[in-house]
Every structure is written in C-alpha cells, then in structure tokens.
Image (tube, rainbow, N blue to C red):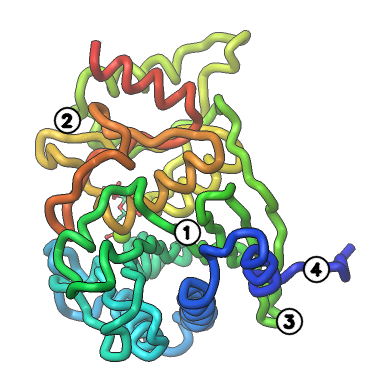
Amino acid sequence: MKKNNIVTLNQFISDQQNEFPFVQGNLSRIFRDIQLAAKMINRDVRQAGLIDILGNFGETNVQGEEQKKLDVISNEVFMGLMDMNGACVCVVSEEDEHIHWCPDGKDAKYILAIDPLDGSSNIDVNASIGSIFSIYKRLSLDKPVTEEDILQKGHQQVAAGYVIYGTATMFVYTTGNGVNGFTLDDSIQEFCLSHPNIKTPSKGAIFSVNEGNLNDFPQGVIDYISWCKESNKEENRPYSARYIGSLIADFHRNLLKGGIYIYPPTKKAPNGKLRLLYECNPMAFLVEQAGGKAHNGTDRILDLEPKEFHQRTPLIIGSSEMVDQVVALMNK
Ligand code: AHM
Ligand code: MG
C-alpha cells in the first residue's frame, strides 16, 4: 500500500541543512539541478524508442568511444543547468575532453564531475543505465580555480551519488553521513525516500565481472573467480554471476544484496576501463559510507592521486570481506 507520510529528497536535504550546515546554500542548489537533470534524462530514456533518440550520435568522445545520442543529450542537460545556477565553477564530464566552465559560476565554491549517462551499450536494448556525479569544494576562493582544485583525491569529495534509470528511477547519494536512496514517484515527479540509511552486507553471494576477458586478468582475480564457482554448501558457494555491463545497475544490486564488482587491469588495458573522477571515486565514497570497500588492487580508491581528468583505474568494489579477499589474492 502506498504511504502518505512521504519524505521528498528536497525535504530531506532541507532537514539536513539544520543538522549539517555544510549542505547549505549552494550545494543544495547543485542538488536541486542534478535532480532536475535526472528527471529530464528519465523522461528522455523512457521515451527514447519513440522519439528517434536511440542509436549513435556519429562521433566518438575523448576516450575514443562511440557516443550515443542519449549520451550527448544527457551531457547537454547537465551543462545547461549548471551554467545557470551560479553554484558550480566548472564541470568535468566523461563526454568532454576539456573542463566545461560555467559562465555564472566564476565565484562559486563547487566543482562537479559527471558521467551523464553511464552504460551506453545498454541504451538501445532497454537495460538499466545511470547518471553519476561527484562534487568537490574548490581549494581556495581567493585565487582562480586550477587543475589542482579539480584533481583532488576521492576522500575530499563533499558529495557523490547516482541516478539509476531501472524498473524504477532512483536517486542515491551521500554527503559523508550515510547513504540514502529515493525512488521517483512518477505521479508527482518527486524523488521520495524509499531506502533510508543503506548498509551493504559485509559478505554477499554475487560476483560481477566481464568473464569474457578472463584470460587477460591477473592470476589473483582468476583464482578468486574459480573460488566463487566452487561448491561449498556451508559458505553458500557457488556464488551467482550477475553482470549487466552497466556499472550503476551492477553496483546498485550488489550494494543492496551484498556482492562484489570487479573491473580488473587486463593485458590490453593495464589501468582497467573505468574512470577515476566520475565513475570510481563517487562509487567508492558511496560504498564506504554504506560499510563496504573500494580498491584498485594496490590502493584504496579514495586515496588515489588523480593526475588527469579522464584517468582510468582498476576497480574492486562491494562487500568489505569480498574486496579484502580479492586484494589479498592479487597481492599474493
Ligand atoms: P561507458 O562509460 O562508456 O558507458 O563505459 C562504462 C561501462 C560501465 O558501466 C560498465 O560496468 C563497463 O563499462 C562495462 O564494460 P565491458 O563491456 O568492458 O564489460
Ligand atoms: Mg561511463
């Protein structure tokens, strides 16, 4: 039965303002616009097959990947809103090679990193996709923003989250005080609190990895995957393999149920595939806030020093005991 005592994302943020003054003012303006972007992208995703916005845009992005029309549309939605809110100095996006400077944000405090629509390969086949965001505070208001302000370590994020366009659309975020999830109620177009204070189990029974690349994985990861497949009744093995190829969808399921997502280094891609600033750092902040872990095999993701905007890193993320086990095998 539907509850009437709903808490919307806006109410939740405004309640937090009293408790946590750092969420005040400009940061909530950015949140308001990310929410709006999510609703606009959600509308487009839901109608994509009907309004000729499926398929390729015809260009490749800075990573040399084919851009989908919806990738480009989603990027423009975010940029358009950030340009005007006066709260965001600049945006780093997966879709743009260079920093996007917000014309109204010269004196603003915050820097946004986004993957406006992650999981492009799933767009045309109607599987779940997502938008990812990560917010930093500029280092000083007294001097112009430099690369140093943008290339901060993940543990300096002030907020991070994602929107999943799945069977339902959800907004999941953290400001460093736990993780909360809000489901979009289509009838009132509001994100409503549905998953308060998400905690991920310390151990799960799901592993998510692109096994097609198995022969290229480090031996420790190969050994872990074989171990997941062994029969052991007491330990609930074999584990289930679940991999959509859409980070947000795989991450979200494992966050709620317990499990591990691995995008390891491969011979072809020694730094893995996923990008540190707008894919791995926000996910790492969220998972740690939910009690899980995120590592790249040698370091905690949130301690990595970004050297460039589109830097990649291997990612091992999820339930803490599972991450520890993979990292231990990789370093044996
Ligand atoms: P994208 O940002 O170009 O969409 O790529 C990122 C996606 C992730 O969502 C997903 O986990 C991964 O790429 C899947 O990669 P692969 O097809 O190599 O398994
Ligand atoms: Mg992506």
In which quadrant is the C terminus drawn? Answer: top left
Q: Earlier in the sequence, mark 4 or mark 1?
A: 4
User: Residue 39 at what x, y percent from top left?
Assistant: 54, 79
Q: Earlier in the sequence, mark 1 or mark 2?
A: 1
Q: CA distance from mark 3 to mark 1?
A: 24 Å
Residue highlighted by disc 2: 216
Q: CA distance from mark 4 to mark 1?
A: 21 Å
Q: CA distance from mark 2 to mark 3?
A: 47 Å
Three-letter amino acid code of the residue under disc 1: Gly
Looking at the rendered structure, the secondary structure element under dot 4 is loop
Task: Please determine whether, in this image, residue 314 is positioned above or below residue 330.
Answer: below
Three-letter amino acid code of the residue under disc 4: Ile
Task: Please determine whether, in this image, residue 36 is positioned above or below residue 182.
Answer: below
Looking at the rendered structure, the secondary structure element under dot 3 is loop
**Nearest the camera: 73 or 114?**
114
Residue highlighted by disc 4: 6
Three-letter amino acid code of the residue under disc 3: Ser
Can the viewer see residue 241 in this picture?
no
Q: Earlier in the sequence, mark 2 or mark 3?
A: 3
